[in-house]
Structure formats: C-alpha cells, structure tokens
C-alpha cells in the first residue's frame, strides 16, 4: 500500500516533468541544426542554440531565466537570408492554451559578447488565440502541440548582422500561474535590408510586460473574455 502510493507519486512526478518542453532543433533552408540536448553543463556537440538547464517553466516575466532559459552564448551560428523561413522544433510539448511569440535581438558584435541585455528585443511573429473560448485549442501553443514545430519568416527588410532568435511559449493552463518557456539561437542574417525596429517595437527581456498584464495573469477558466491580446510590443514585420 505504502510502496504503491510512493510508486504512483513517482509516476506523477515523472509525468509532470515530461509535461514541459524546449526547442531542440531548427530547420533553415532545408538544413537541420541540432539544438542543445541534455541538461547543462553541456555534454552534447556544439550547437547554434544557447544551452538550457532543464524543461521547467520560468514562472515570472521578470526572472532572468525568461530571456533564453538560462542559456549563454553558443559555439555555432546559422546563416539565414532575410526573407527566409526558420522552423523551430520541440522534442515534446503538452499545453494547448497560450501564445507563441518569436523575438529577435541584434547583437552589436560577436555572439560571445551578446547577452541580450537592454531594450533591443522585437517580435517578428506571434499567435495568441484565434477564436474563443480561452479554454479551447485555437491557440499558438496548440499549433506547437499538434506539430511540434513553428515556422517564422525573417523580415525581408531586416538589416544584415548577428541576431539572437528567441522562441517563447507562454502556457496559461493554470489559473493565474503563467509558465514561460523560451530558448534562443544564434543567427547570422544576410541580405540587402536596411531596416531595424525602433521605438515601441522594442522591449527588454526580462520584463517585456508586467506580470499583471492581462495576457499573462489570467484565469482562462473563469474569464469570459472572447479575445486575447499577447503581452509585449506589436509584431514588427
Ligand atoms: C558564425 O559562424 C561562422 C562559421 O560558420 C564563423 O566563421 C563566424 O565567426 C561565426 N560568427 C560569430 C559572430 O561568431
Ligand atoms: Cu509543462
């Protein structure tokens, strides 16, 4: 009896750990770029992705870990042309309520000294709820649940340079208990674009919105809202 309750407690814990996820690879121009696998310190081969410690959610928009799930610079970078697509892939993902938000950040120089600090992050893509109810599955994260992938286009007019790309899943399935899942990778963007976002398109991470933002602190089970607004700035495209 005692042993069986311990065993079911262990099984429950394992299920909870398995109930999270992280980006584990990228596809750019038909090439596959493995992401970080295994928990840090790194034992996997060098990647374009900043390493992350575990699948656990970050619970606060002001936690430093929300930026790149704790990752610091990676050894590699991938070249991508402005206007081309990048697909992020998740090894596993289980939540279907909440937005997907894809962000970029222009590094001023080498990736090794690019930490993503300051008000330099901008969104290139996002999907919140496309139709109610809030408890349904018409959400960006439901697309990731079904396909374990998310494809975005690098804006064609974006100026070339070294950029971080950050894929963020915000899971809202627990009332007033937001869960942030974000990983970053290093991209060398090429092309003849000349534009970079400014002003209200830019945010700092952590802290791109208030923890009390209605898109973050929400009880999807008691709210009667029929629309949802993603937290943070508008998409720059
Ligand atoms: C990006 O990777 C290339 C090799 O693919 C390397 O030559 C280059 O130095 C890297 N860029 C940075 C800024 O680390
Ligand atoms: Cu989870």
Image (cartoon, rainbow, N blue to C red):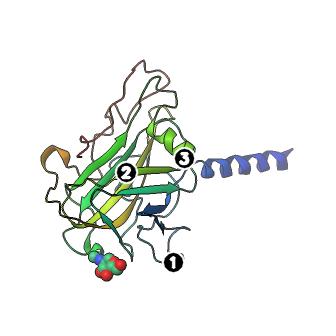
Mark number, residue 152: 2
Residue drawn 76% across and 46% down?
8
Graded by Cα atoms within 10 Å as few (under 14), some (14 to 19) or many (20 or more), the crowding at tag 3 reads few
Relative to 181, residue 173 above or below: above
Res. 17 mark = none
Q: Secondary structure at mark 1?
A: loop
Helix or strand or loop: what does disc 2 sit on?
A: strand
Coordinates of residue 22 in the picture (x, y in percent) = 50, 56
Q: Secondary structure at mark 3?
A: helix
The label on residue 147 is 3
The reply, left or right, for residue 220 in relation to residue 117 is right
> What residue is drawn where x is 33% and y is 58%?
84
- The alpha-carbon separation of the residues under discs 3 and 2 comes to 14 Å
Write down which quadrant ligand 1 falls in: bottom left
Tell me the residue that label 1 is attached to: 45
Comparing 33 with 62, the one in front is 33
């Amino acid at each position: 009896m005692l042993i069986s309750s311990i065993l079911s407690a262990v099984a429950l814990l394992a299920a909870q750990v398995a109930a999270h996820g992280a980006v584990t690879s990228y596809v750019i121009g038909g090439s596959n770029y493995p992401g970080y696998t295994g928990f840090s310190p790194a034992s996997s081969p060098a990647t374009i992705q900043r390493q992350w410690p575990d699948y656990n959610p970050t619970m606060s928009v002001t936690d430093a870990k929300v930026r790149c799930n704790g990752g610091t610079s990676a050894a590699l970078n991938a070249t991508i042309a402005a206007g081309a697509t990048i697909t992020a892939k998740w090894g596993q993902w289980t939540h279907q309520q909440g937005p997907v938000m894809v962000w970029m950040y222009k590094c001023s120089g080498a990736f090794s000294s690019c930490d993503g600090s300051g008000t330099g992050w901008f969104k290139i893509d996002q999907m919140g709820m496309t139709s109610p109810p809030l408890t349904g599955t018409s959400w960006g994260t439901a697309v990731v649940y079904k396909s374990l992938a998310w494809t975005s286009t690098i804006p064609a007019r974006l100026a070339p340079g070294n950029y971080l790309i950050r894929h963020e899943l915000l899971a809202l399935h627990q009332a007033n208990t937001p869960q942030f899942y974000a990983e970053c990778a290093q991209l060398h963007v090429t092309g003849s674009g000349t534009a970079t976002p400014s002003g209200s398109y830019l945010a700092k991470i952590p802290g791109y919105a208030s923890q009390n933002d209605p898109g973050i602190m929400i009880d999807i089970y008691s709210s009667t809202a029929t629309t949802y607004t993603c937290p943070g700035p508008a998409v720059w495209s």
